[in-house]
Amino acid sequence: MKIMKFQFNIILIILSAQFIFADPPDWSFNYSDYSDNSPITAIVKLDDVVQDGANDLLAAFAPDGSVRGVSEPGPSGELPGFSDYAGTSYFGFAVYGNANEADHVFTFQYYSAANNQVIDIDETLTFSPGEQVGDALAPFFLNGTLVDVDECALGTDNCDVNATCTNTGGSFSCACNEGYEGNGVTCAVLSISEGLIPIEYNIQNIYPNPFNPVTNITYGLPKNTQVKIEIFDISGRYVQTLINEFQISGYYSVNWRADNHPSGVYMIKMISGEYVSTKKLMLIK
């Protein structure tokens, strides 16, 4: 029989980025605090792709970082047929300021709901009170660059602690490490005690119990057989399958990670042929 050996690597990743990752930002402000404004008709491009997300936002900022204008969610509409950019989605809103702020340089940020990112816009605006900035014939083009979000580095990939996350082109995948089985989000470790054959079926031990959030279940199979091990809550509702496969005779162990389950009493059920055993375990968080 094969003895599984496991190696754990701890990787510390220090991150820095010029982009902000956020839920919809709070860009509220009181326009009545300012005496002047400049209306804007803008087309936003990220990675040279026109943006038209229904929940996207475009905002302007004064040099001190204060919000000076924000669009309604989503584009204001499409440019009319007489425009060279007919049918292109645009954002229309006003940038606010006071007369003494003429020639101050304002900046822009764009919130992309689909990517859950706030992106710095390359272009700036020299504020000129009352001046129209862009129109249907000559819209104001604003450009930015989306960041390839590395879910693996950010730690938001939801992979199991015993899995490896791989990020490719902005999408990620989880794969259980060697010696583990599962879908990458949930990985169970299997090990066989070499040279030992139990005389009967049994759930030999559950340790620790009570536990938080991981416990180890050892069990014995006196002959080669199909075995299923499942977890149920105290009401009898199915929670998770830990094992469902053909195994050779021997002693085995499997971990149950209950990070995403509430505290309470659970039942572990082992079925192999005519053998059925149920034992109680308690999760305390």
Image (cartoon, helix red, strand yellow):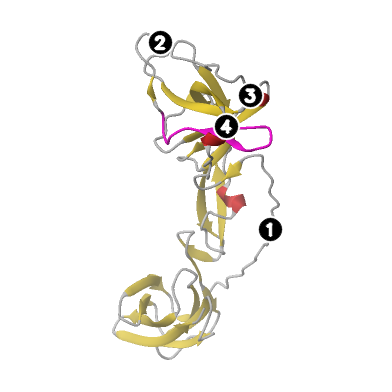
Answer above or below: position of 103 versus 13: above
Q: Choose between 97 and 118: the one closer to the eye.
A: 97
176 relative position to 122: left or right: left
Secondary structure at numbered mark 4:
loop
Query: Identity of the amino acid at label 1?
Result: Ile
The residue range painted magenta reads 61-75
Magenta stretch: dominant secondary structure: loop
Q: Earlier in the sequence, mark 3 or mark 1?
A: 1
Query: Identity of the amino acid at label 2?
Result: Ser
The residue depicted at 49 percent of the width and 40 percent of the height is: 115
Q: Earlier in the sequence, mark 3 or mark 4?
A: 4
Query: Identity of the amino acid at label 3?
Result: Ala
| Residue that label 3 marks | 99
| Residue that label 1 marks | 11
The residue depicted at 50 percent of the width and 22 percent of the height is: 39
| Residue that label 2 marks | 83
Question: Picture coordinates of residue 64 (x, y %)?
Answer: 68, 36
Question: Picture coordinates of residue 247 (x, y %)?
Answer: 42, 73
* Residue projecting furthest to the bottom: 199
Q: Quadrant of residue 5?
A: bottom right
Q: CA distance from mark 3 to mark 2?
A: 32 Å
Q: CA distance from mark 3 to mark 4?
A: 9 Å
Q: Choose between 218 and 92: the one closer to the eye.
A: 92
Between circles 4 and 1, the one closer to the viewer is: 4
Residues marked 3 and 4 touching at CB (< 8 Å):
no
| Residue that label 4 marks | 34
Q: Choose between 232 and 103: the one closer to the eye.
A: 103
Q: Does the segment drawn in magenta span residue 42?
A: no
Answer above or below: position of 82 versus 97: above
